[in-house]
Image (spheres, rainbow, N blue to C red):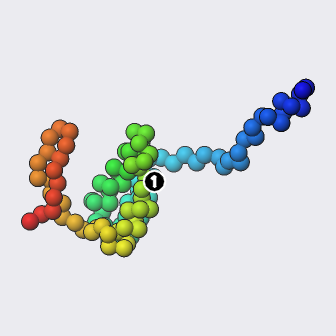
Amino acid sequence: MGDRGQDSQQPRPAATTPDVVVSAGHVRAFCCELLATTGMPADAALLLAEALVDADLHGVETHGVVLLPNYIRRLQRGGINPRADVRTIHDTPVSAVVGRAM
């Protein structure tokens, strides 16, 4: 077969773009800015941004910043109340029961 047969079987690398590294702080701030455009209060936006970034930092990308466009879309369409008054009803070290304020 010779060298020609081996060359034709080698996979060619896919065209890629260089990775861009952005600090967690910058991503968090970016998320907060976008969430603020939906009418979400700054403290709630920071809480959500921190949760999304922390998920990514812990390797759980399915629960991270990848979800931000979905949250923005749902907030804009009224599927999520940006000013919901949610309270912790009961919590333990590993779980919490939350609900709306009465």
Q: Is residue 40 left or right of residue 15?
A: left
| Residue 62, x across and y down, in percent | 42, 48
Residue furthest toward the bottom? Answer: 77
Q: How many marks?
A: 1
Q: Does 35 sit above or below residue 26?
A: below
Percent position (x, y) of residue 92? Answer: 14, 40
Q: Is residue 96 left or right of residue 13?
A: left
Instruction: Give the labeled residue for mark 1.
Output: 66
Residue in the foreground of this view, choosing between 59 and 20: 59
Q: Assign the C terminus to one quadrant of the image.
A: bottom left
In the image, residue 9 sits, relative to residue 32, either above or below, namely above
The x, y position of residue 88, in whole percent, is 14, 53
Query: As drawn, which residue projects farthest toward the front?
Result: 1
Say if 81 sits above or below 97 in the image: below
Q: Is residue 53 visible?
A: no
Residue 79: image location, x then y, percent: 32, 69
Residue at screen point 38% across, 62% down: 71
Quadrant of res 1: top right
User: Tag 1's secondary structure?
Assistant: helix
- Amino acid type indicated by mark 1: Val
Q: Is residue 96 above or below residue 78?
A: above
> Residue at left 45%, top 53%?
66
Q: Is residue 21 visible?
A: yes
Q: Nearer the viewer, residue 8 or 21?
A: 8
Residue found at the very far top of the displayed protein: 2
- Left or right of residue 2: residue 47: left
Compare residues 9 and 13 and report the one nearer the observer.
Answer: 9
Structural crowding at the residue carrying mark 1, measured as other residues with C-alpha within 10 Å and reported as few (<14), some (14–19) or many (≥20): few
Q: State the image quarter where residue 99 is shown.
A: bottom left
Residue at position x 55%, y 46% in the image: 21
